[in-house]
Image (cartoon, coloured by chain):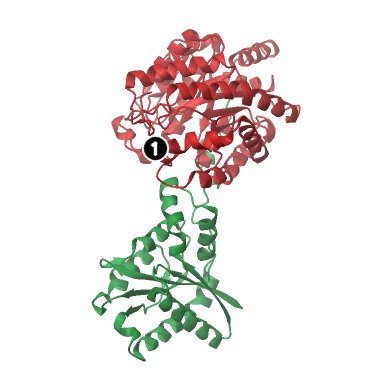
Amino acid sequence: MQFGIFTVGDVTTDPTTGRTPSESERIKAMVTIAKKAEEVGLDVFATGEHHNPPFVPSSPTTMLGYVAAATSRLLLSTSTTLITTNDPVKIAEDYAMLQHLADGRVDLMMGRGNTGPVYPWFGKDARDGIALAVENYALLRRLWTEDVVDWAGEFRTPLQGFTSTPRPLDGVPPFVWHGSIRSPEIAEQAAYYGDGFFANHIFWPTHHFQRLVGFYRDRFEHHGHGTRDQAIVGLGGQAFIRPSSQDAVREFRPYFDNAPVYGHGPALEDYLRETPLTVGSPQQVIEKTLTFREHFGDYQRQLFLADHAGLPLKTVLEQLDLLGEQVVPVLRREMDALRPAGVPDAPTHASLVLAAQQRTQQDPQQDDAAQLTAAGRAA
Amino acid sequence: MTRRVVVVSAGLGSPSSSRLLGDRLAAAASRALRAQGEQAEVEVVELREHAVDLANQLVTGFPSARLADVLDRVTSADALVAVSPVFNASYSGLFKMFVDALPVGSLDGVPVLLGATGGSARHSLVIEHALRPLFAYLRAATTPTGVFAATEDWASAGELEARVERAGRELAALVPGLAAARARPVAVDPYDVSAFSARFSEPLSA
């Protein structure tokens, strides 16, 4: 199972000091956080993509390329890549390039974005969100799996004899997750392609997401990629950890009370009760995270939100120490012990390449990466 | 059979005139239901008790467990009595926050008796110009008679009571027919695969 962190990249005033970091500071802090994630033994660093203040990460592959050079083991991902407003041609090129630079340590998570005004900035209509996600992703896959593409669709200019360069590393595209918090059609899309499905369930009660994830698992099986418990599921998580839970609550409360998403609303105690947020000791975070498995079944990727709401870099790095040293090793052990045989790990570049080789040996005539992806999971 | 009549009152005082009006309207509707040979069971929701949960829902995007329970009780009612005080020429903000928390389609075809209270009879048409369009949008089945009670109505015998009785009869009359007609499905099931299966039906291999 993969554990990691995902960042929104918000520039938020620290409510305890009134200090606001500069964009430059925040961007450099994100890199420091990513390097720290590797240092403490986490598997994944994922960055959001935003095109409006107070968020800085508008160019994820620039940042991830830099992080790739500064790390050696960390898997680089996104949370999310805007499949609606980005040109799928540019996504194909950017992430294939990143794959080469990062020696395959790349996957990505598609999302529609939750900021309506972004669409017209990129010449799109927010009402077309789902249709854009469907058409753009279908094209993106073709650009990665077919060397020469002829294509015509509704949302971008046609392509004639187009080759996206560089070609994916080792002929194997990055693994793709699809993130959604409420759209069954996106779960269907993930299931249809045999891709992963990520439910960022941190801001709402768990029961909102159980049907969505269950639906994805059912449809994954329906589309012939394996049994429902072999579907590739990722979940969000949100924790603030201190050795003692009283200290954690006291320190985090002002950040909670002023946080961009839920601040100035419910009491911390209500939110702790009703959502996956944990503020407490390592043991409490472990216990809460283990309930995710009970609610959603054995899953492949757990990402925590750790750097947000104006938390200073020093605090975030301390959080990663606690996560890496005291929380994740226990979760790995517990989740591994509970996981039945036959539930696969999330595909990686290595597993996808291996599956591709096995397929070529079995059937040299066929070289279809769409099937390779499915086979990668079985491997 | 037993019909659940749920009163939603946005009154703030204790006792509030909106609550008093709601109780009277529910009692009149219950009498009329019994006269039709049915049983009635009245529940009251005082929105004042849920003011913080309603505000939190705006911020978080989800109802607390307690508010979710109230929403279920209201949307599963056989008939609603909805009463708001008039604040600055319309229903109160608390009342509207509750309406905004209702899931889309959840009052489709539900019989609703509208009530409002105010300090002066000059607000009487608030039911017609504010409440009724709101409930028309929700596709609720409002009774032809809405009941406005001004301060002076509580002091004069007879007239308010006559309007309350008439409105109660109208609500009771709507209940059996609409209960039969109302299948109360979610308007569109987002999990209905047929809505999008055409986009994901071709075999994957190129």
Q: Is residue A250 visible?
A: yes
Which shade is chain B?
green
Say which residue appears at 39% left-offset and 74% top-offset: B18
Residue A160 % position (x, y): 38, 18
Q: Which chain is red?
A: A
Residue A337 % position (x, y): 75, 27
Residue at the bottom extreme of this rendering:
B158
Residue A75 sits in quarter: top right
Say which residue appears at 26% left-offset and 66% top-offset: B88
| Relative horizontal placement of residue B9, taking residue A191 as reference (left or right) | left
Q: Is residue B146 above or below residue A202?
A: below
Viewport quadrant of the N terminus of chain A: top right
Q: Is residue A195 visible?
A: no
A361 or A282, nearer to the observer: A282
| Residue wearing tag 1 | A260
Say which residue appears at 74% left-offset and 31% top-offset: A338
A10 or A295, nearer to the observer: A10
Mark 1 crowd level (few <14, some 14–19, many ≥20, 10 Å Cα)? some
